[in-house]
Amino acid sequence: MSGLSAPPTVETAVEARSLSKSYGDVPVLEDVSFGVRRGTVFALLGGNGAGKTTTINILTTLIKADGGTATVAGYDVAARPHKVRGEISLTGQFAAVDNRLTGRENLRLIGDLRHVADPAGTAASLLRRFGLEEAADRVASTFSGGMRRRLDIAMGLIGSPAVIFLDEPTSGFDPAARNEMWRTIRTLAEGGTTVFLTTQHLDEADELADDIAVLHQGRIVARGTAAELKKLVPGGLIELAFGDDETRDAAATVLGTSSAPARHEGARLTIATDGSAAQVARVFAALEDARIEPTEFSQKVATLDDVFLKLTGVEGGDDR
Amino acid sequence: MTAIRHTLYLTWRQVRNFLRQPWFVGLSLAQPILYLLLFGALFKKVVEIPGFATDSYITFLTPGIVVMSAMFAGGWSGMGVIDDLDRGVMDRLLVAPTSRGAIMLGRVTPQVLTILIQTGIIVGLALLVGGHFAGGWGGAAVLIVVSALLSIGVASLSNGVALLLRKEESVIAAVNMGLLPLLFLSSAFLQQNLAPRWIQDIATYNPANWAIQAGRTSLMTGPGSSGVLSHTLYLLVFAVVCTWLATRAFHSYQRSV
């Protein structure tokens, strides 16, 4: 349908073109397209039932799309699934570990199946890296939830896959565990691995992702960086308070020429910016030039929540 | 060759899994002992029916119990698949560059270990309580081979059912509905020519009966007896076809995750 037919390049780790999938008469994905640049973190953001897991299942060769094409690491997922499997790993929503194997044995098994050069050494170094050395030779059924999840992630790193798929990697985590996972994901990305994650948490996408696609009811409703998405809603408001109304008016006059529309409220002035530090700095520079000193300053930055709500209309929006 | 290596890795996983459930190991080994002694006592006088070829029911029953235990051990194999599906372990294996055939074989070949141990225990106990097996070690070896082939075939079907239906209840129902009739439509408990004609007819096409006939003949008279080779070959075909069918079930699973 879309005229996009350029061949995949090595710079594109994942490319989806007009993917569609239905279960029976129920469409789950419709015309889903996006690209993931190599070595970046990509977040597919959406609520329950948006189609995130279905998208991941198609990209990881677990299921076939009804329409559209997708490539991962340059290979078509439908035509060359075995090649794709050699380049990826999938860590699903549940810690997929074998309860009756030890931590070490779980890692060994995947290392063996992926033909890594030194499965035992790989297992040992991953156990060390994920703080599982002490528990290494206990069966996984004795592990705590956090340990199982760490083991799960470690299993996904074996064989250094080019693209790592993480389906809701922090769902059900407490804040400490979530931060730990975020650190792990950032480390992966710094090492050059492409990370494809799904999340329903806007702060997570904001925190981790270079690029975000918002999936809602099986459709991509927005794509871009966190900053680009935030521009979709009025945001970056700054509020200044002044000693009296005259000072405020003087400030309004000064800023009226150098900045976006402002709003008056008592001795306060609210100014819409693009949220960038540069623009905020310009506001203060202009005030300083005019020798006007605000008594208070506060800032309200648009969050991805605002974007999500506006795009998906989940809370009072009119988008769909 | 990759597929063979993968099969070995996954077989080893299953074997370890099995050995780490001491209660399960204990029960699955004790159960056939119970059957041998209970059925043996219950039907003791069956050998007095005119035309019965042996005078020791324990001797007659032993291969039947071995095959029955092997078949049921295979039948429950699908429960492990359900467990792997629920935990996401199956998806991880499917997403790894592993052949589907190896994933299936790695699940069914560990049956051989169970059968080896079970057969040793059952035959050993039968000898203690008065069984006599003229077929000797060779006869026992054939019994193990045919039981293993039957078990691999049944385990594959069970795994296929698990992949298609994805519920423990379905596997339990399939095992009970499918395997019990196979057992009663065989010569496990009663000499074939003493059963009603229609049961004899069905038994001709019953893989469980192939295993029992081949196993019993070779255990009682020797591996070279007539019918042993042909029945063993039928079972080999049965095992291969079932494994192939079950591997096909992955495609169906992957269409409908």
Image: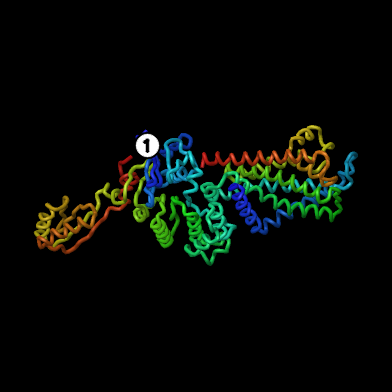
x, y percent for residue A39: 38, 52
Q: Amino acid at mark 1?
A: Ser
Residue, x 74% and y 39% (percent of image)? B233
Instruction: State the residue in front, A159 or B158.
Output: A159
Q: In the drawing, does residue A239 fall left or right of residue A111? A: left
Coordinates of residue A310 in the picture (x, y in percent): 30, 46
On screen, residue A231 versus residue A15, left or right, reads left
Estimate the x, y position of residue A3 in percent, counting from the top left.
Answer: 35, 34
Q: Nearer the viewer, residue B33 or A188?
A: A188
Question: Which residue position holds label 1?
Answer: A5
All told, the count of numbered labels is 1
Q: Residue furthest bottom?
A: A134
The answer to whether B132 appears left or right of A132 in the picture is right
Mark 1, other Cα within 10 Å: few <14 / some 14–19 / many ≥20:
few
Please say whether residue B65 is visible from this viewpoint: no
**Element marked by disc 1:** loop
Q: Is residue A31 above or below residue A106?
A: above
Q: Give residue B201's quadrant in the image.
A: top right
Provide residue B182's location: percent of width, then percent of height: 73, 40
